[in-house]
Amino acid sequence: MGEWMDMLRQFNFLTVLLRLFLAFLFGGCVGMERERRGRTAGLRTHILVCLGACLTILCGVYIVEATGLDSDPLRIGAQVISGIGFLGAGTIMMTRQNHIKGLTTAAGLWTTAAIGLALGCGFYEGALITLILALVAMRPLDVLERHINGRKNRARMQVYLEVGGLENVNQVLSVLKSGKLMLTSCEVEEARSHCPTNVGLRLEIHFPRDMDHEEAIRSLSALEHVLFAVELQG
């Protein structure tokens, strides 16, 4: 095993090919997780970041090998860590409700770049362990974090719903009590459409902070028997 690892850490065409292929694969693993969540930086972005970081460090090693200069090949790679911050900053945004989104994706890009650097250096073990731990942090620990925080991770808003028919109100409310949109209070009022068969509902809804208010309203409007939904101010 030790001899194989020594061979893989040599600098030749086959090891360069292996490192770039692993950078493509490892970056794709992190990117796929972000892609499934619909994040701005998804599969292709993470692959390119990991490949670019890997090639950068390979260039540093190549320059030393080709010229024989007594230079630090890691110096050029160090610029990747600082430079990736500009790309990560582009994934962070402030919503209209003053909630910050994109921090996990930005951290994922930074970690993906570090994985690429490790692969470029031939530090396969560190790259693989980091990949596994990063995926654990993004998926299982995300579920645990939401469970621990409970409602702290949920935003709330006041909503007006108009339901077609009094007989359908209980069905709509039962759906809200069991879905991502958590119903915490409900008041019946006159339908704003002035249609005598419709029922107006003033609701307080709790929903995940990673869901925009507009997305929550669209989800409410899509419920069966709901004619329209609007957010109430104040």
Image (cartoon, rainbow, N blue to C red):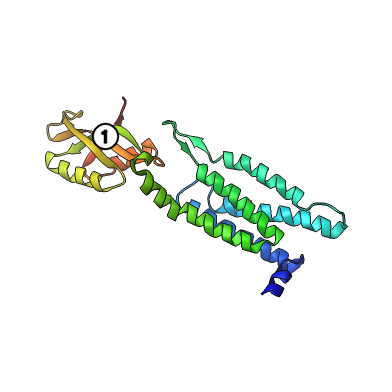
Picture coordinates of residue 67, whole percent (x, y) = 87, 57
**Residue 174 seen from this side:** yes
Q: Is residue 18 left or right of residue 211?
A: right
Residue at 64% over, 44% down = 84
- Quarter of the image for residue 85 reads top right
Could you say which is closer to the camera, residue 16 or residue 103?
A: 103
Residue at 71% over, 74% down = 3
Specify few, some or many for label 1: CA neighbours under 10 Å numbering under 14, 14-19, or 20 or more: some
Assign the N terminus to one quadrant of the image. bottom right
Outermost top residue: 234
- Location of residue 25 with respect to 192 vertically, above or below: below
Assign the C terminus to one quadrant of the image. top left
Picture coordinates of residue 150, whole percent (x, y) = 34, 44
Picture coordinates of residue 215, whole percent (x, y) = 37, 40
Picture coordinates of residue 172, whole percent (x, y) = 20, 43
- Location of residue 126 with respect to 234 vertically, above or below: below
Q: Is residue 181 left or right of residue 110?
A: left
Could you say which is closer to the camera, residue 199 or residue 110?
A: 110
Q: Which residue is mark 1?
A: 204
Q: Is residue 62 left or right of residue 23?
A: right
Could you say which is closer to the camera, residue 231 or residue 206?
A: 206
Q: Is residue 82 left or right of residue 44?
A: right
- Location of residue 187 with respect to 129 vertically, above or below: above
**Residue 25 seen from this side:** no
